[in-house]
Image (spheres, helix red, strand yellow):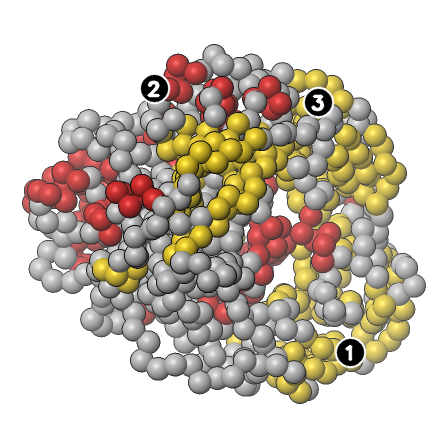
Amino acid sequence: MVIAPRLRICAAVVASVLATGFAGAGTLSIDASAPTPAPLNAALRLGTATAPNGATLGANARYLTRNGAPWLPVMGEFHYSRTPASQWEAELRKMKAAGIDIVASYVMWNHHEEVEGKFDWSGNRDLHRFIELAGKAGLDVVVRVGPWAHAEVRFGGFPDWVVNAMPTRGNDPQYMRFVERLYGQIGQQLKGQLWKDGGHVIGIQLENEYNIDGPGKGAAHIAALKKLALKAGMDVPYYTVTGWDGTIYPTGEVTPVFGGYPDEPWGVSTKELPPKETYAFRFDTRVSGDLGAQTAAHAPGTAETDKEVTPFLGAEYGAGLPFMYRRRTVVSADDIASMLPVQLGSGVNLMGYYMFHGGRNPLSLGGTGMEESSLSGGYNDTTMISYDFQAPLGPDGQQRKVLEKLRPFHLFTRAFGSRLAPMTVRKPDVSPAKPDDLSTARFAVRSEGERGFLFVNNHVRQYDMAAQKTTQFSVKLPGQQITLPSKPVDIANGAYFIWPLNLDLDGTNLHYATAQPLTLLDQGKAGLVAVFGANAGVPVELSFDAGTRVTAAGGAQVAASAGHTLVTGVQPGAGAAVTVQRDGKRPLTIVVLTAEQSQQLSVVQLAGQQRLLLSADQAYVDGNALQLRSVGDSKFRFAIYPALVNAPKATTTGAAWNAKPAAKAAAAPSNAGAYAAVDAPTATVALRAAGNDGIFQAFEATLPAHEIKATVTQTRNAQEAAPVVIGGSAKAAIQPAPENFKAAGAWQINVPREQLKGLDDALLQIDFVGDIGRLYAGTRMLDDWYYSGYQWQFGLRQQAALLDQPLTVSVLPLRADAPIYLPKEARPDFGGAKQMATVRSVTVIPVYQLRINP
């Protein structure tokens, strides 16, 4: 990923004052009247781009194509070797349900060839099976083959024996012989699974964060890697490289991909950072600031000079952030989701996340860590095992709030991406000059001809944006001027959204809407349902062409206004807000969900057709069944449209918490997870019809509730922790040396596993205050955590056999004088004490799962 940076030194302190109060915005204008030029043919040498069934992939200088049509997919990173293989299928299906189209994954060399010549592609390292399961879940795959990955792993993924014996990241003959052998192994894993074979591998990323130049390096090295990849059989449509921090590559051979993060956990500051440019629309560059390459660039990279001939693609927009020892940044769901309108409004035509699914590092064959650390010369100190990343899907598959905030945008790109992709970016008449301008409105338009989308962001992490009072937008298109809304509105601090301009809804023109398009449900002759989401605090208006015959529900008013048919007073909800009568055409229904309902909406293929699903529970489809997963609540509720013809049946799917895999568990490396509980039972439960939620058919079910008791006993008092050392290549706080953990306090945790029978999982939640927490079974470390105020959870299902003996959590004291960054909300009150190490509580949260067979 991007998190292993060079040292950044601020030359000045940001002078701007936090925006409070409001800005009198008035009319915010943008000129989108210039003709949209036809996209240039990208000078990209793609691999074989036609599948056996005739399906094609392609690219021009503006966007990707699928079967000749514009294509704007969403890509999410998920590391197979950091997740138990037994979980892959369900987790990939969860990603698909969350709106992901492509799964990306690093191949970490040292996870596969820790000992020279002894490759391991089994168990949690079985790349071939991971790709098969991704295809089964309906996902395409981009394989990031390195050989240098970074990924916060030891030596960036290089095995120790490579680092010790030869120069790397250049065309050194010895190094390239080993790279060729690695690529040959990867090629065998991908055999039969490439796009040209009818498989799902559509892309290969070469190297990572590469801005090194010189003899045998730079463009020559990337070109040499591509030749080796082709020699190994990795013939795919797309070849990419990361495009930030002055990357260097051979033009035409690869396509740059970009990213941006809401903070810099790789930084050395112990304070809040100035506003990040990730929240500001980009009109002249694709690089969102310093993304933390480990090497320094000395000139603008190839990606900057190639921006007119390559599409704007993303790979590493942070769906969360990792915790570094010296900087433990916690991000909110809005910190992440507000980047979406900014990136899409800046022209991004592949929305790629790092990470979308968290994981845990395997330990080495010798039982030591394989994480990036200053002890092994790394720039950052990361946790030995945990790679949680605050990701939308946690290491144990738990759905975080950020996923709910992202999913409406994923629905939008899937339904409207083919329309958005050809559109060009239009800059406002007035826009912020710098990221620390917190008063000027942040917005952009992407348009083509008379149609377009308006993108607005009024959220900046850790800073208050000025509320844009009494605001209207004025967009000049080639043949008309659109002013919206009809009356000025206030855009609050923290608001962000996308509004349509002249949106074609099956032949009916929606002039504009002050609600975000979410999805379209095409029911054939039964009609089209267009679903929108309301924005909190902004009244919903729907403006149609004059003469459109509209029937509005719920007390909304329909009137002629400025040559259009205007619907005002729309009350968001699950009912039909508007129906449009169209002579000789199928019906058109518009539903405007509340902001909360928008976050609960999924589109699923169920009982032979596509349906809308509303549920606060985690939902995904497995075969022909709907799976609902609830953390901590045995009550389920879901609503579906169109209604199911046959009454569905519900069963619970729980793990059998038996001891059969215990011997295998004891022998397996830490967190390998290949010994999941077996013989999962199913038991029919009652599914109750719960009437209708608007147009949706609602159902409820209640499973037997589990109250799980964990006993906690302190077994060792903490001792005085050694002072935090300043050092490493970052010249900042470094993680304590192993021998310093003798100062840790210890608590024994007892969870009788009989209490867990019938559950899908159980999350051990450890609320502690200290520096570093570690969870053990005996002397074997299961997980670890840097204290930050972010909740530490650990799934027990994969470790069920270990619960016959107590677990232990150790807490290294946090010193009051530790020179690290903690969010102000998490900074403990030391009350004059020199240090703190305490376990405030340990709870076990049941995870229930309900299977619906329609």
Residue 560: image quadrant is bottom right
Please tell me how many numbered marks the rendered image carries. Answer: 3
Report the residue at 85% width, 48% height from top. Answer: 694
Mark 1 touches mark 3? (CB < 8 Å): no
* Residue indicated by mark 2: 667
Q: x, y percentage for residue 739?
A: 26, 42
Q: Is residue 683 visible?
A: yes
Q: Which tag is nearer the camera, tag 3 or tag 2?
A: 2
Q: CA distance from mark 1 to mark 3?
A: 50 Å
Taking 837 as reference, is 205 left or right?
A: left
Q: Is residue 776 above or below residue 149?
A: above
Q: Secondary structure at mark 1?
A: strand
Residues packed near mark 1 inside 10 Å, few (<14), some (14 to 19) or many (20 plus): some
Q: x, y percentage for residue 168?
A: 14, 49
The disc at residue 651 is: 3
Q: Earlier in the sequence, mark 3 or mark 2?
A: 3
Residues packed near mark 2 inside 10 Å, few (<14), some (14 to 19) or many (20 plus): few
Q: Is residue 29 above or below residue 778?
A: below
Decide which of 68, 358 is in the foreground and name it. 358
Decide which of 192, 366 is in the foreground and name it. 366
Q: CA distance from mark 2 to mark 1?
A: 68 Å
Taking 762 as reference, is 853 left or right?
A: right
The amino acid on which the numbered mark 1 sits, given as a three-letter code, is Ser
* Residue indicated by mark 1: 486
Report the residue at 19% width, 61% height from top. Answer: 212
